[in-house]
Image (cartoon, grey):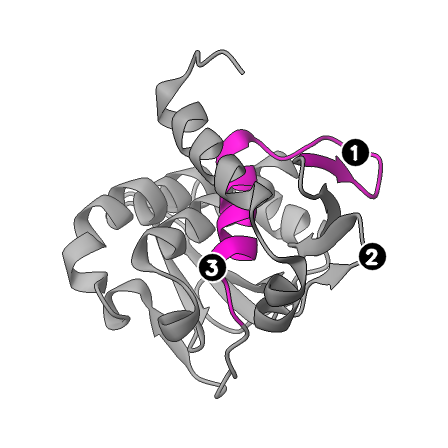
C-alpha cells in the first residue's frame, strides 16, 4: 500500500503486519471474538464486522460502509492485544483510570470538547441518533445514552445544552473494566469512535 496519510496509514500498516502473525486461537481466548477458521467477527457499537486472517480485509455484515482507517486500526489492536475483563458495575471518567491524568489535556480537546460542541448545540438530533442506534437512555445530563462498544465494554455519553451564560458541555463514562482492558491511548480512540458514529447517524 502506498502511504499517503502518515497519521492514519503508518500505524494501520504496522498493526496489519503484526496481525498476519496472530494466532487466532489465542485471540479468541483473550477477547471472546468469534472465529470461523477464515474470519474474526467483532461487534462494534451494534454493527458486526468480519475481519479475514492472515491477509487482512474487513467487511460490514450489514452491507454498509466500512469504518475509517483509525477505527480499523483500533479493531486490529483489540484483536492483537485486547482481553476480556469482568465489569464490576461502576463507571469511571477518563481521568480516574490509569494514565488518565497524563492524557487528560489531549483527551479533553479531542473527545469532550468535540462532543460538547457537536451534540450540545443539537440535543434533539443527538437524542434521535442515539435512539436510532438502539442506545439505552440514562438519567444524567440534559441527554445521556449508554452504548456497548465491543465485547463486554460499555460507555455512556452525557451532554448538557449550552445557553446564553454557559457553553455546551459533555462527559463520557467508561465501564470500570476499561481500566485493565484498554491502554489510555485506546480509551481516547474509543471516545473518538463513539462520537463519530453518533455524528454519522445524525
Number of the label disc, if any, that sits on residue 155: none
Residue 188 sits above or below residue 177 on the image: above
Quick one: label 1 or label 2, which is nearer the N terminus?
2
Q: Is residue 196 magenta?
A: no
> Where is residue 55 drawn, in percent x and y?
67, 35
Q: In this picture, which residue range is highlighted in magenta?
A: 57-83
Number of the label disc, if any, that sits on residue 36: 2
Residue 185 sits above or below residue 2 on the image: below
Q: State the residue in front, 94 or 68.
A: 68
> Where is residue 136 drawn, in percent x and y?
65, 67
Q: State the residue in front, 189 or 22.
A: 22
The answer to whether marks 1 and 3 mark residues whose Cβ atoms lie closer than 8 Å is no
Q: Is residue 95 visible?
A: yes
Q: Is residue 46 visible?
A: no
Residue highlighted by disc 1? 64
**Residue at x-position 49% and y-position 43%:** 18
Q: Measure the C-alpha gap from mark 1 to mark 2.
A: 22 Å
Q: Circle 1 sits in a helix, a strand or a loop, which is it?
A: loop
Badge 3 density bin: few <14, some 14–19, many ≥20, Cα 10 Å: some
Image side of residue 102 versus residue 64, left or right:
left
Image side of residue 145 versus residue 179, left or right:
right
Q: Measure the C-alpha gap from mark 1 to mark 3.
A: 27 Å
Q: Measure the C-alpha gap from mark 3 to mark 2.
A: 20 Å
Residue highlighted by disc 3? 81
**Residue at x-position 40% and y-position 26%:** 10
Q: Circle 3 sits in a helix, a strand or a loop, which is it?
A: helix
Of badges 1 and 2, nearer the viewer stands 2
For the N terminus, the image quarter is top right
For the C terminus, the image quarter is top right
> Where is residue 83 drawn, in percent x and y?
51, 69
**Residue at x-position 41% and y-position 47%:** 189
Badge 2 density bin: few <14, some 14–19, many ≥20, Cα 10 Å: few
Amino acid at each position: 500500500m502506498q502511504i499517503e496519510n502518515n497519521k492514519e496509514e503508518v500505524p494501520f500498516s504496522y498493526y496489519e503486519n503484526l496481525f498476519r502473525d496472530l494466532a487466532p486461537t489465542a485471540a479468541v481466548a483473550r477477547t471472546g471474538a468469534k472465529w470461523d477458521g477464515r474470519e474474526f467477527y467483532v461487534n462494534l457499537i451494534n454493527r458486526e464486522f468480519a475481519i479475514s486472517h492472515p491477509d487482512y480485509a474487513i467487511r460490514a455484515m450489514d452491507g454498509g460502509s466500512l469504518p475509517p482507517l483509525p477505527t480499523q486500526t483500533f479493531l486490529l489492536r483489540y484483536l492483537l492485544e485486547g482481553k476480556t475483563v469482568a465489569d464490576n458495575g461502576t463507571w469511571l471518567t477518563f481521568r480516574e483510570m490509569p494514565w488518565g491524568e497524563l492524557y487528560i489535556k489531549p483527551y479533553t480537546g479531542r473527545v469532550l470538547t468535540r462532543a460538547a460542541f457537536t451534540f450540545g448545540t443539537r440535543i434533539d438530533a443527538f437524542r434521535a441518533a442515539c435512539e436510532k442506534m438502539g442506545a439505552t437512555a440514562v438519567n444524567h445530563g440534559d441527554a445521556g445514552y449508554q452504548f456497548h462498544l465491543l465485547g463486554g465494554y460499555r460507555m455512556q455519553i452525557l451532554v448538557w445544552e449550552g445557553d446564553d451564560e454557559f457553553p455546551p458541555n459533555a462527559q463520557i463514562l467508561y465501564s470500570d473494566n476499561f481500566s485493565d482492558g484498554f491502554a489510555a491511548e485506546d480509551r481516547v480512540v474509543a471516545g473518538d469512535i463513539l462520537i463519530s458514529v453518533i455524528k454519522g447517524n445524525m
